[in-house]
Amino acid sequence: MRVKSDPSPSPCLPSPPSPSPNLPLYSLKTPLPSRSPTIKDLLTTYPVNLPHFEAIRKHFHANPELSTLETKTAAYIASYLRSLKAFDEIFEGVGGTGVVGVLRNEKKKDGKGGKGGKGKGKVVLLRADMDGLPVKEQTGLEYRSEVRMRDVDGVVKDVMHACGHDTHLTSLLAATTRLITMTSHWTGTLIILFQPAEEHLGGALRMVNDGLFDLIPTPDILLGQHVGPQITGSLGMVPGIQLSASDSLLVTLYGRGGHASQPAVCIDPVLMAANVVVRLQGIVSREVNVGEEFAVVTVGSMRAGDAENVIPDSATLKINVRTIDEGVRARVLGAIGRIVRGEAEASGAPKSPRIESLGRFPVTVNDAAVTERVGGSFEEVFGRGKGGEEGGYRPEDFPRTNGSEDFSEFARAVGKPSCFWFFGGSDPDLFKEEEEEGKGEEWRENSGRRKVKKQIPINHSPFFAPVMEPTLQVGIDAMTAAALTFLMD
């Protein structure tokens, strides 16, 4: 149940860690130039206290929570936002455990005026996701997760931040803190959104359907980011399609159970399911024009029965589909339905199969104009990465990927432009080792000019652990710079 919480600070933050007078969250490092400051000037003048936020990231990493169950994470975030004493409104429980803060800043760039009111200038929304994955961590980190918890189905599972959401959370908290110190240099309304259930059960759409945009101003620009296995210090994105659409399906096939020694008097759903799996492989190879169209169909789970001498009465398949075109998407989903129903009929199934949606993510499309402006700010702040160098703004290393995200649900709900970028988290030494030792070995798809070897852990791996720095610094700087791109208009 969503609630509007008191934006005044709580007596203390959950620990560890908590802000302390002896550990400032930010400090003035260098005076601003006499001319109008640039984004890079502001980032130099208002650095964050990295040790503080590194400790926060370690706390999040060691204490992950599964999708829709991020109660402790959400409580920590809400308490932290209240401690900043800057937000006009803080909402908790949006879409389950989502947390949203609204800061209206009427101050002009010359420092005149006051905070509050409707807020002039752009309305900018910054988003981070909160949930972990049901993965047993094997990174060996001192702050590794050893958490086990019951999922929404009551099954106890290991939990890990195997997709870097701990880095996303911390980067947004730090960027928020930093932007609050800069309110005399920007004008507008800042919306900070922490989303539950990105990995499972469609947290973005849950927030939208729970009345998110009845609670907050309609954003003019929506911004998000994601850490990946590329080299740390680098970041980038492309205009247009950045991530594919995703559809997850649960298929239940029905048979007639009985003794394994008498299959003639049974209808075997295992054979039925096996035939479906084989036939599904022909969709992309035979029904999609692979020279011009893109699709992936994967059967990730097949389950039936519990004993070798019993023919079960049902079998289930979990299927995932990736596409980037709505026409292809409809055609592939239609083909899956046709094959499943056709195989059930051909096998003499006693009743029709059931096909249920487990969730769907839309295509993530980066608005060209917004992406160009954000890219300009990234080039100013990080420099343009060049061949042989490590780090910097390198859009060529972050092309469209077959992965999926539900971030764009927010932009679709309000019909506003958005931009979603990636930043690298892998140790540069891993790339050097791979380049020296791995000649002739296979490389991963979707890694651009600087490729990612199969041996380097990627998102969702039990070994995925973005190095602390400069990964966290880049995440903080990128989110801050992207927001200022529109708040300093």
Image: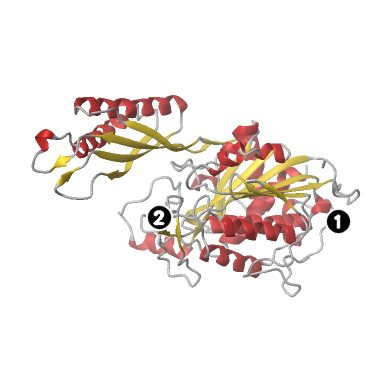
Choose between 115 and 64: the one closer to the eye.
Answer: 64
Res. 290 image quadrant: top left
Choose between 227 and 245: the one closer to the eye.
Answer: 245
Q: Residue at x 44, y 24 (%)?
A: 327
Return the residue found at the far right.
Answer: 112
Res. 54 image quadrant: bottom right
Residue 234 in the image: x percent, y percent? 55, 54
Quarter of the image with the C terminus is top right
Q: Is residue 108 left or right of residue 220?
A: right
Q: Residue at x 29, y 29 (%)?
A: 340
Residue 336 in the image: x percent, y percent? 33, 29
Residue type (three-letter) at the residue carrying disc 2: Val
Residue type (three-letter) at the residue carrying disc 1: Ser
Residue 155: image tag: 2
Q: Is residue 125 left or right of residue 406?
A: right
Q: Is residue 205 left or right of residue 77?
A: left
Residue 119 in the image: x percent, y percent? 82, 42
Return the residue found at the far bottom.
Answer: 22
Q: Does residue 220 show up?
A: no
Q: Is residue 171 left or right of residue 7?
A: left
Q: For mark 2, does the 10 Å Cα neighbourhood hold few (<14), some (14 to 19), or many (20 or more) residues?
A: few
* Image color mode: secondary structure
Q: Residue at x 68, y 69 (%)?
A: 18
Q: Secondary structure at mark 2?
A: loop
Give the alpha-carbon distance from disc 2 to disc 1, as whole Å: 61 Å
Q: For mark 1, does the 10 Å Cα neighbourhood hold few (<14), some (14 to 19), or many (20 or more) residues?
A: few
Q: Earlier in the sequence, mark 2 or mark 1?
A: 1
Q: Does residue 107 show up?
A: yes
Residue 307 higher or lower than 350, as above or below: below
Residue 98 higher or lower than 85, as above or below: above
Q: Secondary structure at mark 1?
A: loop
Residue 34: image tag: 1
